[in-house]
Image: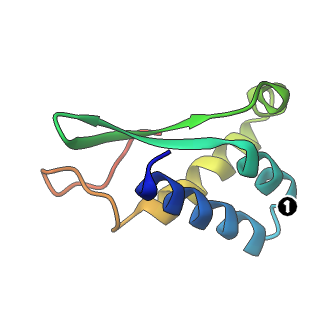
């Protein structure tokens, strides 16, 4: 992870903890976050989830929603595409 990815990861994990999603935050601690670019334009945010946690996330739509909503909240108004739009893909 680069510096921006690491800051985004820390803020995302802290938001989960602050909102009492401690089990999901425990998964987030082990997850890597990467902002993927297309010609220097942020395209989307990717999660590299550990294999041990993948089974829980794969089978639980609620966990997926919490992870995505928390990241959307953290990245909103902080990471923009050149067009000025917030990232819409996670």
Which quarter of the figure has residue 56?
top right
Question: On the rendered structure, is 15 left or right of 81?
Answer: right
Across and down, in percent, residue 78 comes to 35, 66
Question: On the rendered structure, is 8 left or right of 28?
Answer: left
- Element marked by disc 1: helix
The residue wearing badge 1 is 22
Across and down, in percent, residue 7 comes to 51, 63
- Name the residue furthest left: 83
Q: Nearer the viewer, residue 86 or 50?
A: 50
Against 30, residue 8 (above or below) is below
Across and down, in percent, residue 21 comes to 80, 61
Question: On the rendered structure, is 81 left or right of 71?
Answer: left
**What's the residue at 68%, 42% (across, down)?**
31
**What's the residue at 75%, 26% (across, down)?**
58
**What's the residue at 53%, 56% (across, down)?**
6
Question: On the rendered structure, is 83 left or right of 37?
Answer: left
Are there few (<14), some (14-19), or many (20+) residues within 10 Å of tag 1?
some
- Name the residue furthest bottom: 18
Against 15, residue 51 (above or below) is above
């Amino acid at each position: 992870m680069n510096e921006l990815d690491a800051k985004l990861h820390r803020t995302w994990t802290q938001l989960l903890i602050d909102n009492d999603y401690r089990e999901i935050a425990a998964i987030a601690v082990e997850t890597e976050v990467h902002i993927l670019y297309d010609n220097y334009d942020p395209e989307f945010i990717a999660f590299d989830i550990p294999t041990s946690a993948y089974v829980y996330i794969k089978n639980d739509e609620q966990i997926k929603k919490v992870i995505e909503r928390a990241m959307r909240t953290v990245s909103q108004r902080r990471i923009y595409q050149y067009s000025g739009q917030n990232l819409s893909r996670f």
